Image (cartoon, rainbow, N blue to C red):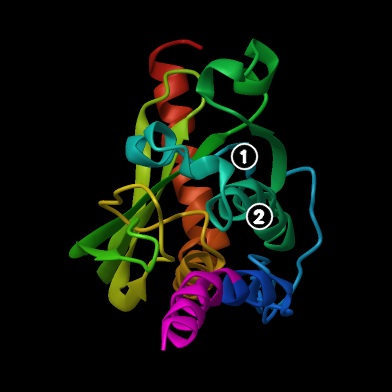
Amino acid sequence: MLKKINFLITMLILFPLMVMTFGGCAPSTPKIEEPVVLPTFDFVPPSTTPVSSTSVSFCVVSPSFPSEWKALGYMNHYPYDKFARNMPADFEEMLTAKGFRTRGPFRNYDELTFPDKSETDLILMPKVEIDVRAAGRTTESINLLGDARYKWNGTIHLSGRITIALNETLSNERMWNKSVELPQRQFSYKSPSSAQPVNAPNINDTKFANELAKYMEEYYNLTFDKMWDYLDPNEMTMVKDQAQEIKDKKRY
């Protein structure tokens, strides 16, 4: 009887060690990484018109973006980075395809030299106001080792507008303005488990970025499709003449 009791005690001591030993040797199931969706953020003009020496000329300035994007470091993360990087070049391509002359893109108005301002008619200045808002909550759980794990679960809401302003080059006075209202969009999101408390979506998570990229590409394409129609050559000639009147009045 004593031997049987000792055997049972020994097994109770050794069994957890055996589970840990053999369990650690067992091959773990490889984690399947979600592939990154690569939006093109590329506008292809539906037609082209030859550029002439008398056509309206533009200085293209890179878009301004929400201060929140910069403060939270979004501009260094996909898909924000590609969205911001591609937009200035596509505005320049669109203007060229319309038959307009272009210079740039410039980072901002202050980067333009006096020859840039005096030898061109208008400045194209885009402004991006895409609002990305998260509404959800953080849940806490305890794993088998007694450690706390955290997840954020909720809904991401997108909305906003993208505005194009045309300014007179030397005075920087506003001459023309058009906005593209962006449709409201939303998607559900659950963050990966984290050892640290989380109170917002994980912008480094591929799943989050892929969902966001899908709607940002929709916004990108909608903006360029609308602006292609808005930048009518006849209207741009009228805006150019109005800008020239300002130059003449102020004796530039």
Reading the image, the residue beneath label 2 is 95
Q: Decide: marks 2, 1 in contact (CB < 8 A)?
A: yes
Give residue 56's quadrant in the image: top right
Residue 250 against residue 144 in the figure, above or below: above
Q: Which kind of residue does numbered mark 2 sit on? A: Leu
Q: State the mark number for residue 234.
A: none
Q: Residue at x 38, y 68 (%)?
A: 144
Q: Is residue 204 magenta?
A: no
Q: Position of residue 105 (x, y in %)?
A: 67, 36
- For the record, the magenta segment spans 1-17
- Looking at the image, residue 18 sits to the left or right of residue 235; the answer is right
User: Where does the image place residue 215, in percent across and percent down from the top left?
Assistant: 45, 73
In the shown orientation, is residue 124 left or right of residue 101?
Answer: left
Can you say whether 86 is above or below 222 in the image? above
Residue of label 1: 58
Callout 2 secondary element: helix
